[in-house]
Amino acid sequence: MHQLRIGLRRLRALVTAYRDALAPAAHEFLSRELRWLQQELNPARDWDVFIETTLEPILKRVAGLEACLEAAKELRDLAQERAQATLASPRYTAFLLRGYSWLATGAWASIEAAALDRPVGEFAGLILQRRHRRLRKFGGKRADLPESDLHRLRLMAKKQRYVAEFFREIEGLLACHHGPVEISRGPAYLGYPRQHLSQPGPLIERPGQGLGLA
């Protein structure tokens, strides 16, 4: 599940990076369906991480929270069933078939996609430089960004890393080789507070809906 989520995030980053080269219908379809897939699959992994990195360490130090752990595991099981149902659904099958058809026919490309005729190194350089400028413009040299902006900066850096890794893998570009290594250190640091704030939410919810702390 973790690897599938990473793959989805990378593909969404590429859809954004290739926006000018994608036919409008292809961009709209891919953006919508990939967002749907991620929303359906995220909870299963989120509960895994919450249990392993938050609840279980707490239980080693604080007694009496066993019921919370059991409730979280039940919610994780439900999320996993939801993810499995999604991957077995007609909608997911249609998504795959349409994607394979586009790859076979080239119908995904925009008529104006002349940039696709360039060498991949040149094309990658243009995309990465443009995205890097946006990243620097947003983050700048400020150290006082609010938490919400830090989270946005982290997401931008992660998308930059995903796109760079893609080009590195298909071409072995030296410029792409050094970029992701340095960029990858940033998202983990920037996202540390946000990851804890955005863990599965139902610790305190309506009675019977969460982990029994309401």
Image (cartoon, helix red, strand yellow):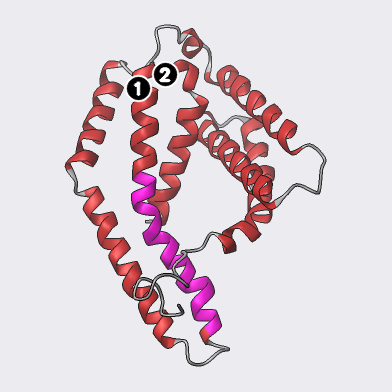
Q: Residues within 10 Å of mark 2 (few under 14, many from 20)?
A: many
Residue 141 appears in the rendering = yes
Instruction: Please say whether residue 123 is one of the residues in the magenta stretch.
Output: no
Q: Quadrant of residue 99?
A: top left
Q: Name which residue lies at 37% across and 56% down.
A: 1
Secondary element type, mark 1: helix
Q: Name which residue lies at 34% across and 44% down.
A: 37
Magenta range = 37-58
Instruction: Please say whether residue 49 is one of the residues in the magenta stretch.
Output: yes
Badge 2 is on which residue? 22
Whole-number angstrom distance, CA of label 1 to CA of label 2: 6 Å
The tag on residue 26 is: 1
Left or right of residue 17, residue 79 in this image: left
Q: Label 2 is placed on what type of residue?
A: Leu
179 shown above or below 60: above
Left or right of residue 141, residue 61 in this image: left
Q: Label 1 is placed on what type of residue?
A: Ala
166 shown above or below 190: above
Q: Name which residue lies at 51% across and 63% down.
A: 199
Q: Name which residue lies at 41% across and 60% down.
A: 45
**Along the line of sight, which residue is nearer the eye, 133 or 150?**
150
Residue 170 appears in the rendering = no
